[in-house]
Image (cartoon, rainbow, N blue to C red):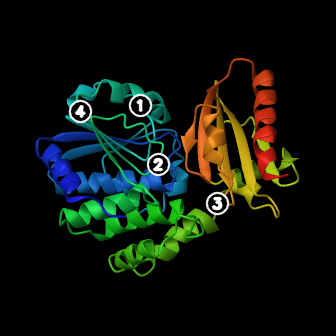
């Protein structure tokens, strides 16, 4: 990917009149949301802006391995009602305001806003929108640092690696390109020798006992449609979210997976596919959601749980029938 010079100039001009900013991302932040939010913090700091990050419904245990988190100004699950204290709200990795959860209200009352994202179905909801086709928001921010001629320190390189590694599935997904390996090679030269190993170990090789039990629950509730579509529904309140659906998608012969989770008065729907020709974004759109062709999601307010679950199962079975004839 390549960011146009005029986009960089526009961003620089916006930031030049900004003194303080609040950085937001979607609830239950994954590696790209977290990594890009942290990298955005350092970007704004380098440009002279005082920034704060708000993470919502994050499992801190998952990210405790990042040794410099304490150096950043981060709030967790806090209502920052007085958002007018900030000149700017910057949103990363969110295709629409609804993904922000309660923080959607903060965005609505913000004087100015910036939206940096890589989802093709982004609704361009901010005052200024920087939406690019990329593996991750981390990749986009890498170009912002370079085009603005800001030196990338170890902490930023670390954040960008977290972002890129997770949103390419450790370079297994179809969005993996030659260019992204060149970017990663550059970032490798800016981190400690053991950093890349530690990122992969903590995200993919070590799973807490509680998350392992939750994955077990996902498998226990497994339903197979058309012999190769994995579906599960769980009613467990937990901050653990990222990666749960992988337990379904990794089953041999599955071409796609759907995971439905009850979370308070909301049903959270996750959709994944293994094949480039299996478009789960279209399925997510049936529930008011969106995302990527091979990874998408949606949220549905609970009205009549049993009826809604039956409807979801029917739509899932019907939708995938065209791929499983």
Location of residue 110 in the rendering, given as x and y in whole percent from the top left corner: 27, 28
Instruction: Identify which residue is drawn at 15% across, 41% down.
Output: 18
Q: Is residue 203 above or below residue 128?
A: below
Around disc 2, counting alpha carbons within 10 Å, would you say few (fewer than 14), some (14 to 19), or many (20 or more)?
many
Number of dots carrying numbers? 4
Front position in the image: 256 or 277: 277
Question: Can residue 317 be seen?
Answer: yes
Question: Residue 273: which quarter of the image?
Answer: bottom right
Relative to 190, 146 lies left or right: left
Name the front one of labels 3 and 1.
3
In the picture, the disc for residue 119 is 2
Q: Which residue is mark 3?
A: 276
In the picture, the disc for residue 103 is 1
In the picture, the disc for residue 312 is none
Instruction: Identify which residue is drawn at 69% across, 56% down.
Output: 246
Real-space CA distance between mark 4 and mark 2, rounded to the nearest whole angstrom: 21 Å
Q: Which residue is mark 4?
A: 112
Location of residue 11 in the rendering, given as x and y in whole percent from the top left corner: 20, 49
The residue sitting at the top extreme is 303
The disc, 2 or 1, on the residue closer to the chain's N-terminal end is 1
Relative to 40, 316 lies left or right: right
Instruction: Identify which residue is drawn at 24% across, 67% down.
Output: 146
Name the front one of labels 4 and 2.
2
Q: Are marks 4 and 2 in contact (CB under 8 Å)?
A: no
Q: Are marks 4 and 1 in contact (CB under 8 Å)?
A: no
């Amino acid at each position: 990917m390549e960011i146009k010079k005029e986009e960089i100039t526009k961003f620089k001009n916006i930031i030049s009149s900004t003194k303080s900013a609040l950085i937001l991302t979607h609830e239950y932040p994954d590696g790209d949301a977290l990594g890009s939010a942290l990298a955005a913090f350092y970007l704004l700091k380098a440009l002279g802006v005082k920034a704060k990050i708000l993470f919502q419904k994050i499992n801190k245990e998952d990210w405790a391995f990042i040794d410099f988190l304490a150096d950043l100004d981060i709030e967790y699950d806090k209502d920052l009602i007085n958002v007018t204290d900030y000149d700017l709200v910057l949103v990363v990795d969110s295709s629409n305001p609804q993904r922000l959860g309660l923080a959607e209200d903060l965005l609505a009352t913000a004087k100015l806003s910036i939206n940096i994202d890589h989802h093709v179905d982004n609704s361009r909801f901010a005052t200024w929108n920087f939406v690019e086709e990329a593996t991750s928001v981390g990749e986009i921010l890498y170009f912002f640092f370079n085009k603005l001629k800001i030196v990338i320190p170890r902490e930023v390189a670390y954040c960008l690696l977290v972002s890129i590694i997770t949103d390419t599935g450790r370079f297994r997904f179809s969005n993996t390109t030659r260019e992204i390996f060149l970017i990663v090679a550059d970032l490798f030269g800016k981190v400690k020798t053991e950093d890349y190993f530690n990122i992969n170990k903590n995200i993919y090789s070590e799973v807490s006992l509680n998350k392992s039990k939750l994955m077990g629950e996902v498998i226990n509730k497994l339903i197979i449609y058309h012999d190769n579509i994995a579906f599960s529904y769980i009613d467990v309140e937990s901050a653990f979210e990222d990666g749960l659906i992988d337990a379904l998608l990794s089953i041999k012969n599955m071409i796609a997976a759907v995971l439905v989770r009850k979370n308070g008065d909301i049903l959270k729907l996750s959709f994944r596919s293994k094949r480039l020709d299996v478009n789960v974004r279209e399925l997510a759109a049936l529930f008011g959601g969106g995302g990527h062709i091979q990874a998408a999601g949606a949220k549905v307010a609970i009205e009549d749980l049993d009826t809604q679950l039956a409807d979801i199962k029917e739509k899932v079975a019907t939708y995938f029938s065209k791929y499983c004839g």
